[in-house]
Image (spheres, rainbow, N blue to C red):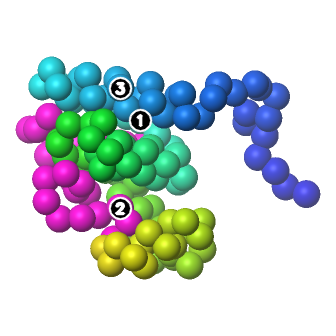
């Protein structure tokens, strides 16, 4: 048996509460005209954070600002998109019904860009930690 045990011996905070706190912090930074840099593991964690921020934007909890994905995160997001059939069924349904990419849409609200591009705008940047 092979298992990931990095956090196996810890009691974790409530996930929804942690997501709300993240969104509130990013929203506060963006409203003040700042930039939020969110370091995250390129595989898995960055995509989770990206989807949390995307849901918050859709719900109006996060101001309209670009979300830039940088570094290896970008390539991994492209791979996730190519392997939609391996994702959680809820995400599969979203991609099928939305008829647009999961992590990349055109426009200023959701972009795969670089940190150099993010440096010229307010918003959030998710990059490998």
What residue is at 65 percent from the left and 25 percent from the top? Answer: 13
Q: Residue 96: where, in percent of width, then height?
A: 42, 79
Q: Secondary structure at mark 1?
A: strand
33 left or right, relative to 3: left
Q: CA distance from mark 3 to mark 1?
A: 17 Å
Sequence order check, earlier mark of 2 and 1: 1
Q: Secondary structure at mark 3?
A: helix
In the foreground, 12 or 3: 12
Front position among marks 2 and 1: 2
Q: CA distance from mark 2 to mark 1?
A: 17 Å
Magenta span? 101-128
Labelled pair 2, 3 in contact (Cβ < 8 Å): no
Q: Which residue is mark 1?
A: 39
The mark found on residue 24 in the picture is 3
In the foreground, 29 or 80: 29
Residue 41 colored in magenta in the image: no
Sequence order check, earlier mark of 2 and 3: 3
């Amino acid at each position: 048996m092979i298992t990931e045990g990095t956090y196996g011996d810890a009691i974790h905070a409530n996930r929804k509460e942690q997501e709300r706190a993240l969104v509130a912090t990013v929203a506060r930074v963006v409203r003040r005209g700042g930039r939020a840099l969110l370091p995250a593991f390129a595989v898995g964690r960055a995509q989770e954070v990206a989807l949390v921020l995307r849901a918050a934007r859709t719900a109006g909890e996060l101001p309209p600002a670009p979300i830039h994905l940088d570094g290896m995160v970008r390539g991994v997001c492209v791979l996730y998109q190519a392997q939609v059939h391996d994702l959680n069924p809820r995400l599969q349904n979203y991609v099928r019904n939305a008829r647009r990419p999961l992590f990349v849409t055109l426009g200023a609200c959701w972009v795969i860009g670089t940190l150099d591009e993010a440096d010229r705008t307010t918003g959030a940047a998710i990059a490998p930690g």
